[in-house]
Amino acid sequence: MSQISVIIADHAPLVYTPKFWDPAKAYQDFKPALEGAYTEGVEYARKHALEPAHSLIARGIGHAAWLTDLQQDFRDNGRLPVKGTDTAVLRTCVRLLNGTVSGYFAGVIESRDGHPGQHISYDIYWRDQQGNALDLRQHGNAACLTLVDEQKAVFKAYGFNANGPYDIGYFQPRFDAAPPRNPNVPDRSAVSYWKHLQATGQGDIWAFTVHCKLGTDGANVHPLLLEVLAFIEGALSMQETIVAKGHISTTDWFGAFEPCWPDAGHPQGGLQKAIIDGFKPFVTVEAFGVAEDFCVYHGKRQAMLYLQGTEHFAKLRFVTDGTAAIIPNAAHVIAQNELARKGGIKFITHDAPLAA
């Protein structure tokens, strides 16, 4: 049996198999048939008298799925590949379909990463002393940068492999090597960004290969997931809540709640209340997405920060096989998961029973 056959078989069975469904599509590039998937959802609901989302919510029995950055550039062969993303999407789609036709899910909250052409998280944003751009394609597609010379805005870059961190070299930001001289202009320099990350316990600046650039195919949602979402919208007469993140060039935005560095001058620069409000109507909120060690990690961190002590904190369920990591088995993820479990957050798999 081929490796892809083994992967395709590694998911829960479907309660109902839509006409568009083929698990092999999780590993393929194709144009999703959105109209057909939506129409089939409408027809399924009519034929089976499926209760619409608003009715499930009104009766207090609706559950939600929280999807983080399940986009093309993070797929196994994407520009910033997160190995295992295609399989995570497959399992996510299986649970979404089973939960929809079973009258379990009544909402979807989805974050989508998107960056302008020059973004502080891009390796090409940084240059060495000779003016050469940082190129992480030979360094595992990711590196962290720590400040070593504040006056010259010089950072030291570290890559990671099986033996741990290793030195890549010294780099400066290409577009803001020094803060603005005008005191009336807010300082959005890389140095100030790094200092904010340190002061708030977020660590160093991370750089990655170019990914999810706005207007490119890489920012698109995985095509199989798009078909499944179209089916759900038709079946439940609902529209998912979409949160766009990452549009501010001077800060990254991992967790869906807010950017790493708040910016009062930008509409995305603060707490996105739509995320918290989106949790309120549901019995539980099940979290899927990538990457486990970055956006999922920070989303969990923000959820624990903003929801702990509220009735919504106990709603969270993290789907352990509905995610994938850039750096698997990262120590900070293991430590966070243990802390989350102690705090009452539950961890499930995609084939767990559909129950509160």
Image: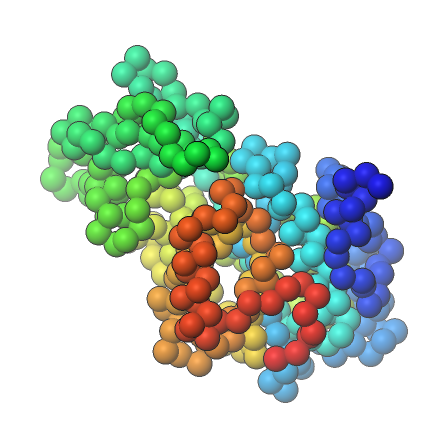
Residue at coordinates 61% horizontally, 74% vertically from top-left? Answer: 63
Decide which of 315, 324 is in the foreground and name it: 324
Relative placement, left or right, of 87 versus 344 is right
Q: Residue at x 42, y 51 (%)?
A: 331
Q: Where does residue 251 sit, x and y in percent of width and height?
A: 34, 43
In the picture provided, is 51 more to the left or to the right than 344? Answer: right
Which residue is at the front of the view, 83 or 257? Answer: 83
- Residue 215 visible, this orientation: no
The x, y position of residue 273, in whole percent, is: 41, 66
Q: Residue at x 37, y 52 (%)?
A: 259
Residue 253 picture location, percent across and down: 40, 48
Residue 257 figure quarter: bottom left
Using the rendered image of the protein, determine whether residue 304 is visible from the camera's viewpoint. yes
> Which quadrant is the C terminus positioned in?
bottom right
Total labels drawn: 0
Residue that sits furthest to the bottom in the current view: 59
Q: Could you tell me residue 240's position as x and y percent? A: 60, 63
Above or below — where is 182 with respect to 338?
A: above
Q: How is the image coloured?
A: rainbow
Q: Check the image and report above or below for 188 versus 62.
A: above
In the displayed structure image, the side of residue 17 where residue 313 appears, left or right: left
Q: Is residue 283 left or right of residue 256?
A: right
Q: Could you tell me which residue is drawn at 28 percent across and 24 percent down?
A: 170
Q: Residue 79: name its quadrant.
A: top right
Q: Quadrant of the N terminus?
A: top right
Q: Residue furthest top?
A: 130
